[in-house]
Image (tube, grey):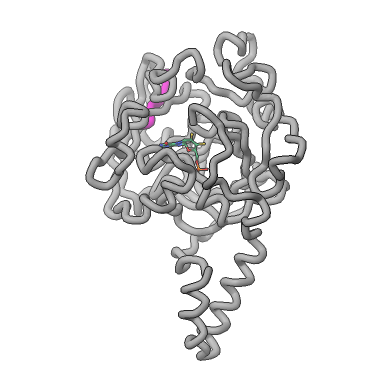
Amino acid sequence: MLVHRRRATDPPASEITPQAIYADRRRLMERAAAGGLLAAAPVLRAADAPPPAAPRLRTRASAFSSSEKSTGLREVTSYNNFYEFGTDKSDPARHARALTTRPWTVAVEGEVHRPRVFGIEELLALAPIEERIYRMRCVEGWSMVIPWAGFPLAELVRRVEPTGNAKYVEFVTLADRAQMPGLRSGVLQWPYVEGLRLDEAMHPLTLLTLGLYGELLPNQNGAPVRVVVPWKYGFKSGKSIVRIRFVEKQPLTSWNRAAPQEYGFYSNVNPEVSHPRWSQATERRIGEDGFLQRKRPTLMFNGYAGEVASLYAGMDLRRFF
Ligand code: MTE
């Protein structure tokens, strides 16, 4: 995430399969299977068929969804940042495959009246799961539109009853050297830690995320549970969470600790505040905007100003970047 360079591994837009085509391929596979045409399947699989489908989640639509075209499933699952599995965009898809996500627990603790350890199946049943199509903006200057599946984090927060001392929420993610080859690198201190102010965590847009494209989260996207905070740069959306801690003091987050002058605690998408080494005024939509094409303008709070600007009323956003 430190530098955005065009790498040999970045898929050019022309090579990426749009979701509709992907879905067609899947339908073809399903029809082949249903019609006893499975003999054709090994050929398709060997060539470029998608991996077997994960279990479908039952989701309901949300008024918070963007009407923009979603980025193709293939790009969403092959162009990732998940440094525990390597720093190359293609590393997470390759190395996270073997991550064990069952059983999985999330300890919710700290300044709460009812600390609790949730099993992943309990989380899946905690509240109705919505499809939330969110714009996502990475601090590196690219963006995607992703149909996440989850429910407001506030649903979980309410169940543990924060005390009056809870001002911030810290998200601690898995750090398992046996499963995560990226932990050998000193690029960050592990575990990866992120944090939000309590009111940000309670905002209805902040999603406890369990799936995407109607299926359980692929490992490279943060299985089995992550948060998604769409008005902030993508690194605030911690993956593979094992602990959620309510605290009084602002947590020291991984990127803030690694490079405080570059990555602030708030990290709200703000086209008017440049990163010290590059502008944040424009972005390239993965799968749509070619490298030679003019980049599209980045919107204040990633386009969610109407919903979240009031959280920052009176704050100097150049200072609290
Ligand atoms: N969470 C963990 N645990 N480790 C990471 O390296 N990378 C962050 C964020 N969450 C990261 C993480 C960054 S920089 C981005 S842009 C998003 O995840 C990418 O999410 P995606 O790959 O699902 O699009």
Furthest residue toward left = 178
Query: Is the C terminus in the top left, top right, bottom left or bottom right quadrant?
Result: top right
Q: Position of residue 299 (x, y in %)?
A: 71, 29
Q: Is residue 300 above or below residue 260?
A: below
Q: Is residue 298 above or below residue 134?
A: above
- Measuring 52% from the left and 89% from the top, which residue is drawn there? 37
Residue 122 in view in this figure: yes
Q: Is residue 110 above or below residue 287?
A: above
Q: Which region shows up in magenta?
A: 166-171
- Measuring 37% from the left and 55% from the top, which residue is drawn there? 97
Residue 110 placement, left or right of 276: left
Q: Position of residue 53 (x, y in %)?
A: 47, 67
- The verdict on residue 168 being magenta is yes
- Measuring 74% from the left and 31% from the top, which residue is drawn there? 297
- The verdict on residue 17 being magenta is no
Q: Position of residue 217 (x, y in %)?
A: 45, 52
Q: Picture quarter containing residue 218?
A: bottom left
Q: Exactly how many numbered labels are in the figure? A: 0
Determine the main secondary structure of the stretch shown in magenta: strand
Q: Position of residue 118 (x, y in %)?
A: 31, 44
Furthest residue toward right = 294
Furthest residue toward bottom = 36
